[in-house]
């Protein structure tokens, strides 16, 4: 499912897939609110890709590859903190 | 990503046999966190956002906490079990406040209107 990544020195990044809000370097308060409002229960979760680590391998994960399964998506401030 | 490996190798594998089984993702710059509304731009970190996404890719529930307070994993499991029950019943059943596996569910319909009190008691809100 997940595409394996070749580890290199460059820091791999992911991001939104498909339609996304226009990016701007200065985010105004109104824009912050609009972004926060994008997630609504009962509505589709925005698709994204992100590089990751799983059981000894570096992989690239795409949310939509998990269609058909229940997904628990957790964000946390940093490694070596708690859940 | 590399730090995820260090964390898993040196600490998490001491808490979970074999290390963390699920993917640990990296969100440099908070690009994913921003579209989910959980990235704290000022602090430059993700807050503790948790999203339950069903097999159709639909967000069924979420919770977001500031970094200092940890989540209640039992409550997350309870919610997932409740959403799974509702989905399996094709929406014919609902789980009232305090529901957990083994407790009574409700069957919404005209007969239930005004009659929830007969099927659900206040003490059922608690464990």
Image (spheres, coloured by chain):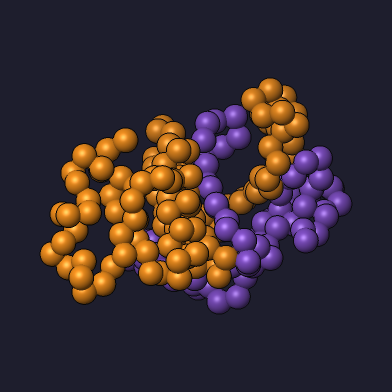
Chain colours: A purple, B orange
Q: Residue at x 27, y 38 (%)?
A: B126
Q: Quadrant of residue B82?
A: bottom left
Q: Which residue is drawn at 72% across and 28% down?
A: B17
Q: Which residue lies furthest to the left in this view?
A: B114
Q: Residue furthest bottom?
A: A19
Quarter of the rendering occupied by the C terminus of chain B: top left
User: At which x and y percent is residue A50?
Assistant: 67, 56
Quick one: A36 or B74, which is closer to the camera? B74
User: At which x and y percent is residue B58?
Assistant: 49, 67
Residue B38 in view, yes or no: no
Quick one: B4 or A44, which is closer to the camera? A44
So how many labels did they put on this image? 0
Tell me: B84 left or right of B123.
right
Quick check: A55 above or below A71? above
Q: Quadrant of residue A17?
A: bottom right
User: At which x and y percent is residue B38?
Assistant: 45, 52
Quick one: A73 or B79, which is closer to the camera? B79
Quick one: A33 or B61, which is closer to the camera? B61
Q: Which residue is drawn at 70% across and 58% down?
A: A61
Residue B104 in view, yes or no: yes
Q: Residue at x 71, y 53 (%)?
A: A51
User: At which x and y percent is residue A32?
Assistant: 38, 61
Tell me: A80 left or right of B87.
right
Q: In which quarter of the image is residue B60?
A: bottom left
Quarter of the rendering occupied by the N terminus of chain B: top right
Quick check: B101 above or below A17? above
């Amino acid at each position: 499912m997940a595409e394996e990544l070749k580890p290199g020195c460059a820091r791999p990044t992911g991001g939104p897939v498909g339609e996304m809000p226009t990016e701007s370097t200065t985010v105004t308060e109104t824009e912050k609110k609009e972004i926060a409002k994008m997630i609504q229960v009962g509505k589709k979760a925005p698709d994204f890709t992100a590089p990751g680590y799983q059981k000894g391998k570096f992989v690239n994960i795409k949310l939509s590859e998990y269609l058909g399964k229940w997904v628990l998506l957790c964000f946390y401030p940093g490694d070596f903190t708690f859940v | 990503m590399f730090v995820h490996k260090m964390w898993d190798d040196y600490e998490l594998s001491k808490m979970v046999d074999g290390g963390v089984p699920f993917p640990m993702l990296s969100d440099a710059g908070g690009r994913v966190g921003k579209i989910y509304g959980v990235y704290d731009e000022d602090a430059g970190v993700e807050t503790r956002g948790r999203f339950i996404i069903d097999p159709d890719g639909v967000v069924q529930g979420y919770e977001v906490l500031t970094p200092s307070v940890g989540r209640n994993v039992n409550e997350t499991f309870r919610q997932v079990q409740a959403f799974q029950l509702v989905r399996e019943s094709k929406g014919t059943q609902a789980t009232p406040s305090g529901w957990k596996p083994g407790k009574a569910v409700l069957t919404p319909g005209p007969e239930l209107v005004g009659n929830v009190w007969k099927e659900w008691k206040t003490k059922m809100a608690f464990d």
